[in-house]
Amino acid sequence: MTTAGQRNLTLAILTLIYVFNFMDRQILGVLAEPIKAELGLSDSQLGLLTGFMFAIFYTTVGVPVAWLADRTRRTWVIAGACTLWSGFSAACGLATGFATMAAARIGVAVGEAGGVAPSYSLIADLFPPASRARALALYSLGVPIGIGIGTAVGGWIADAFGWRTAFVVVAAPGILLSVLLLLFVREPVRGKAEAEATPPLGAVIGRFLRSPPLMLVSLAASLGAFACYGLMAWLSAYLIRVLGMTLTEIGSWLSITLAIGLGLGIWASGALADRFAHRNPRMYAIIPGVALAIGAPALVLATLAESWAAALPLFGLALGLSIFYLAPSVAAIQVLSLPGERSTASAIMLLCLNLVGLGGGPVFLGVVSDWAMPAHGSGSLRVAFFALVPVFLIAAAANLAAARALGRVATSAS
């Protein structure tokens, strides 16, 4: 696939699939309050459902599926995964308690494990290094678009018809997108080194673990994801519980805030990486590191706000800065990996990122909130949000360490 039209069509379909990937993944956080009330869940249980329980299956299944994608048609892997996660997302609407909701969420996680890493690999084969970070940033806009639409649609439908109907409506388009992918996207030719770069899974994992730049970039991204996923998972509940928003207001205003904040953060980080990182690879880590350092005081100011109208723009800023890790880190992994192992290397990075970030962030905030509830009541989530501020700073420091490792790679290459 060589024409710009073919490249852009593939990118558009993959991005649309990613939109529904994140809609299905994050809608549980949007509907946390009515689900908690009907199913009798604690904040810790909600944290497990949105975080660790999802992440452990998403990450462990992701590596072998990505290894398979490096050796088979990636379009078939992505289409099958999309069909699977859409079906289980609809099944979340049938849950009767913690156990049944957990089973449905595990199914969503297993399906989504086959979506992102093969898509990264496809995009890396279609776009040259000079424009790759922007292409990956465009693909990653599926995150804010999916969260924004999911928040709006989920909030409105849940308010009008109940949270169970919201799960079904959000999940349904995934089946159609799987068919569109198979009809209109052809498998691109892999990188020039593909014929001699198809190592076994163990060799790819070993090379990844022995590479300080790969490991440090993954660690820094994981800590950024811890802050970002934790904030995203609990923001709807915080605004309802602490600042008195309604589900309809969540659907109207939080959706816009998430889409704009996360969208600008992803696009800006990708554009900056393409602008500066090809001359100085350290910028793949310096850019998100600076953003996270600025995001810490933004989160403090947002959490101190006493009205949702004042808090929303500040939360949007904090979220946008927290997600600066995504496009640069993914682009760095593609640059540091051989063409025949990009799906697998991406899956290993995503394993670290989601196990630490998606698995840890929501659970951390839920546990802190339950711990603080006897003393602070409905304000316990405010205490949890303040506890997230040091994570922003730790993630910024980890990015500086990753930048030093990337600088050593650039020096040895020259």
Image (cartoon, rainbow, N blue to C red):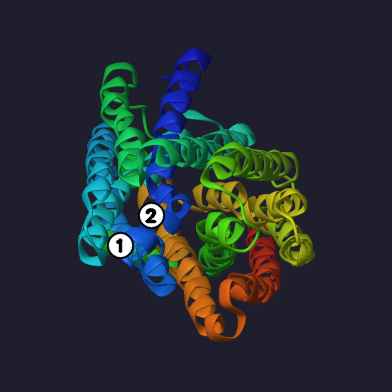
In front: 79, or 34? 34
Please state the total of marks drawn on the protein image: 2
Is 379 left or right of 30, judged from the image as shown? right
Residue shown at the point (54%, 66%) measured from the top left: 226
Residue 120 seen in the current view: no
Residue shown at the point (27%, 39%) measured from the top left: 86
Is 395 left or right of 71, judged from the image as shown? right
In front: 194, or 43? 43
Q: Position of residue 295 (x, y in %)?
A: 74, 60
In front: 13, or 90? 90
Residues packed near mark 1 inside 10 Å, few (<14), some (14 to 19) or many (20 plus): few
Q: Of the residues shown, which amino acid type is indicated by label 1?
A: Leu
Between marks 1 and 2 in the image, the one whose residue lies nearer the viewer: 1
Which residue in the protein does label 1 denote? 39
Q: Secondary structure at mark 1?
A: helix
Q: Is residue 259 above or below residue 280?
A: above
Q: Position of residue 266 (x, y in %)?
A: 63, 43
Q: Position of residue 5 (x, y in %)?
A: 49, 13
Is 186 left or right of 362, judged from the image as shown? left
Q: Position of residue 2 (x, y in %)?
A: 46, 18
Q: Which mark is residue 347?
A: 2
Q: Is residue 360 above or below residue 186?
A: below
Q: Which mark is residue 230?
A: none
Q: Is residue 85 above or below residue 101?
A: above
In front: 249, or 111? 249
Residue shown at the point (27%, 17%) measured from the top left: 183
Q: Of the residues shown, which amino acid type is indicated by label 2?
A: Ala
Find residue 213 and report its image quarter: bottom right
The answer to which of marks 1 and 2 sits earlier in the sequence is 1
Residues packed near mark 2 inside 10 Å, few (<14), some (14 to 19) or many (20 plus): many
Q: Is residue 280 above or below residue 358?
A: above
Residue shown at the point (75%, 53%) measured from the top left: 314
